[in-house]
Image: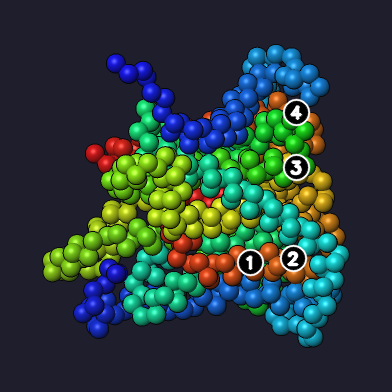
Amino acid sequence: MGIIQDNERKSGQGKRIYRCFMGILLLSIPLQILPHLWMFFGMFKDKLEVIAFPPSLFPKVFLWANIGQTFEYFNLWNNIKNTMIICFGTIIVQVTISSTCGFGLSKLRLKYANHLLLFFIGTMMISNQATIIPTFLMMNKWGLINNYLSVILTFSAWGWMVFLFKNFFDAIPDTLLDAARIDGANNLGIFTRIMVPLSLPVFAIAILNTFNVVYSQFMVPLMLLPAKDKWPLMLQIYTATVSAVPWNQIMVLLTTASLPLIVIYIIFQRYIVEGIVMTGIKG
Amino acid sequence: MKKIKWNSGWLFVLPALIVFIVFKYYPIAMGVGISFFKYQIMSPPGIFIGFGNYIRAFKDPYVLNALRNNFEFWIIMLVLNFWVPLALAIMVNEVTKHTGIIRTMFYIPAILPTVVVTILWKYIWQPDYGLANFLMGKVGLPHQLWLNSTLLVKWCMRFPYLFIFAGLSAGMDFIIYLAGLSNVPRELYESAELDGAGFWRRLFRITLPMIRSTISMLLITNTIAIFNLFDEPKIMTGGGPAKSTETLVLYAFDKAYTGGEFSYATTITTIAFCIVFMLTVMQMRLQRRSDM
């Protein structure tokens, strides 16, 4: 609910300000969509039309063939496959270690649990930028350069995830666990049979957020995956822009990269927004 | 007296503990460690040279240039970007009809990848055929070089953040502000109305003080992002023209990637990390004081 009260919206200052805000918002929506529409239609232009001046929004002819050609030229399915391997690998490792860790910290009466939580949250101050070069040297020593594992493991240590799971598990009553213990369940049984089914929404938030963040990563794969056939989508797009690739093909790449995120977003809006509110951090 | 019972709960914490130590704490410690060496990749860590790298860094005109660039980016962020998501969130929060669809329109872009948006804007800023110069022509202004001009390039790079639809962090900040705004209790506005306080008075006396902690939290995350800036300059300009967008992290990356000077590069990232660390501690101090 806004600052302006319902009865004020009818007249006077309240009405003026309300009108003014609505005007700005309605004007800004098309203004904000325009660059992305231009990207979308740029996909179908021919390679001279896309750099014609003055620029046009709609293509004269829709060249659907551009899409197929671009996919073939860049071997794009391979990049998409790489991105998916990295995303799902990270989701599996990160969600597993973070949820079990959150369970341990929250419910298993460990000594120093609060200090340990600080130990995990503290890593949020250590950005990927600060650790990328030592990580590169470390992975180099272990022979993991050009291995998806190097990227997956680097992304898996995300302090916020542990915090998210711990906070959620704290809200589940201990009596449920005690009842299960009396029935003879061990910790692993309690975790898989009680905690996980009770916390499916938090798993959804965790999975969707990890997917979004890892999907968009650029610097870490740039450093750790130098081989062309290991590149995720983002690296392929970057490389295309620094080599002389025509802009219409680049627009195909950009649209291809945005589409899955938009589709996932439209389906799972609630979880994604909730996740953003709770993290306050992207990547 | 029974024996000390080993708590099997540690098994649940152990995997995360190992991953976090190996991939967060160990690299940062190793980074600080090798910044005191002249690193040799064949026989790490190489030759110990004490503070040699740090002395070199503070005499290196490129490091000083990068620091200045980071600082200028920060100023531009404050002028051009920081207030936009807040203003928009306040306006969207006033919407009473079609709330769902309007919010969705403003939410979607928060998830678009930086790489996509940055490249799209690189296309818009193209001097020969870009949308920017077309619009400049329409309103009768001379065409500009945009990304090729040392004067304008930093502004061009931050400009997309004006648009919530550009995604990037602006969309994130918008969502967080909106959540903060909806937590302001209604009763405060109602009693302020009875006292005869107008819109602006309510905004400055109630709304903004109530979400002060959100604002300062986002100010610090945005500042940290600026001192870790890498993706946008790398993708849009590669640090040019004439090194005017080269940031600390980008310079360190080039030193490591093309120069092979790993210890010097980690020295630079360590300096950037120290700046971020000090800012974060400062923010926590300030927040604690304001909470009391």
Of tags 3 and 2, the one toward the viewer is 3
Q: Is residue B265 left or right of residue A96?
A: right
Q: Is residue B26 visible?
A: yes
Which of the colour schemes (rainbow, by chain, secondary structure, one colour) is used? rainbow
Q: How would you rate the neighbour count of disc 1 (Cα within 10 Å): few for under 14, some for 14-19, many for 20 or more?
A: some
Residue linked to disc 3: A147
Tell me which amino acid carries mark 1. Pro
Q: How would you rate the neighbour count of disc 4 (Cα within 10 Å): few for under 14, some for 14-19, many for 20 or more?
A: few
Secondary element at tag 2: helix
Residue linked to disc 2: A253
Q: Do circles 3 and 1 both sit on a common chain? A: yes
**Residue at position x 81%, y 81% in the image:** A63
Residue linked to disc 1: A260
Circle number at residue A141 = 4
Pointer 3 and pointer 2: residues touching (CB < 8 Å)? no
Q: Earlier in the sequence, mark 3 or mark 1?
A: 3
Q: Earlier in the sequence, mark 3 or mark 4?
A: 4
Distance from the alpha carbon under mark 2 to that under mark 4: 34 Å
Distance from the alpha carbon under mark 3 to that under mark 4: 13 Å
Pointer 3 and pointer 1: residues touching (CB < 8 Å)? no
